[in-house]
Amino acid sequence: MRLLNASGCLDALVAPEVARSLDAYVTKTVTPLPREGNAPVRIAETELGMLNAIGLANPGIDVFLEQHLPRLAELGVPLWVSVGGFSLEDYVHVAGRLAPRDEVETLELNLSCPNVDDVPENVGEVVAAVRAVTSKPLYAKLSAAVADLGATAKAAETAGADGLSLVNTLKGLALDERTLQPVLARGAGGLSGPALRPVALAAAHTCFRETRLPIVGMGGVARGRHALELLAAGASDVAVGTALFADPGAAGRIRSELEAELVALGFVSPDNAVGVAHGSGPPDPRPEVETRVSKIPAY
Ligand SMILES: Cc1cc2nc3c(=O)[nH]c(=O)nc-3n(C[C@H](O)[C@H](O)[C@H](O)COP(=O)(O)O)c2cc1C
């Protein structure tokens, strides 16, 4: 199991030591052209999580390649670049520019941003077109807010994705206490944090059944137990997003909490917990030797 950050939730150039506490660093989504993003207010807190409407603010692929990537490569952490766009051509352009760069380990296609107006409709088409321009591992980042997540995940698999990142934020709204007007300038925004945990579990559970793709599970992970449950639902790696804003040291803490959870339930390693929510259950708590002895037929 690898522990990653969720895209957009950590600026490694501002907090390199936090990035180094992860097994891989995922960039904020990069688009062909620079974007200022949406007007402020772009972040709001709610009782159950955080709302953001950043709107894919990023320097654009040219500046990213020239200025950001060389500095990110110095971190010494495997780099995943999140690729975004507003048309199939946008995704192909950004992925094609990243393809020859050895500093980049994996591409994550952001096919699910709730804060822009033109999101791609056809996940399979985008994945297939990007697959044609790069041999790098390709993860499709999906939203749980699609009509049939299992079918969408399958389409990504058929089109050549190597993995799934689940889930992106869900659309939510916060109203000002006094004026009852939307807090975010854009109105609604993407809900992340604790409210997403059951959504992320269901998404990982569905896609583990419907595809054979490895899954990066994310959505409200703040404790080792949350990571464990995502593994059990079917994720093989876990990403931390909103929790990093409150606790930049979350990665180390989550790892040690997870270790304790695994030991308490008798799992030898995180990988042994992957998919156990699908019927295999935790290992027999009795010591192995005793189990074996008790199974020897009397003779
Ligand atoms: C402030 C903020 C910015 C985000 N920016 C991106 C982004 O650029 N690309 C992307 O794919 N997801 C983005 N996300 C979504 C996260 O990567 C993640 O899917 C989501 O927040 C759920 O995880 P969490 O509950 O642990 O935060 C953003 C989330 C937040 C809170």
Image (cartoon, grey):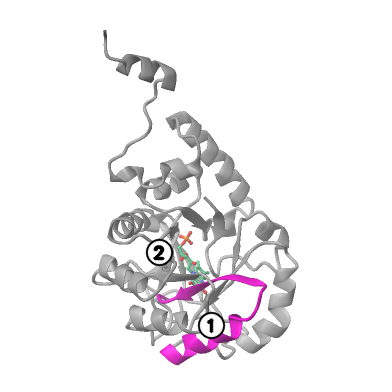
Residue 31: quarter of image:
bottom right
**Residue type beneath disc 2:** Val
Rendered position, 288 above or below 169: above
Q: Which residue is the site of mark 2?
A: 167
Foreground: disc 1 or disc 2: 1
* SS state under label 1: helix
* SS state under label 2: loop
- Percent coordinates x, y for residue 115 in the rendering: 43, 79
Taking the image as drawn, is residue 145 in sight? Answer: no
Q: Which residue is the site of mark 1?
A: 95
Q: Residue at x 51, y 76 (%)?
A: 42
Rendered position, 123 above or below 33: above
Q: How crowded is mark 1: few (under 14 residues within 10 Å), some or many (20 or more)?
A: many
Q: What stretch of residues is rendered in magenta? A: 87-112
**Ligand 1 within 8 Å, label 2 CB:** yes
Residue 192 tag number: none
Q: In this view, does 212 lie to the left or right of 94?
A: left
Q: Which residue is drawn at 52% across and 63% down?
A: 6
Asked if the magenta segment contains residue 109, the reply would be: yes
Asked if the magenta segment contains residue 215, the reply would be: no
- Percent coordinates x, y for residue 283 in the rendering: 38, 31
* Sequence-earlier tag: 1 or 2: 1
Q: Residue at x 32, y 36 (%)?
A: 281
Position of the C terminus by quadrant: top left
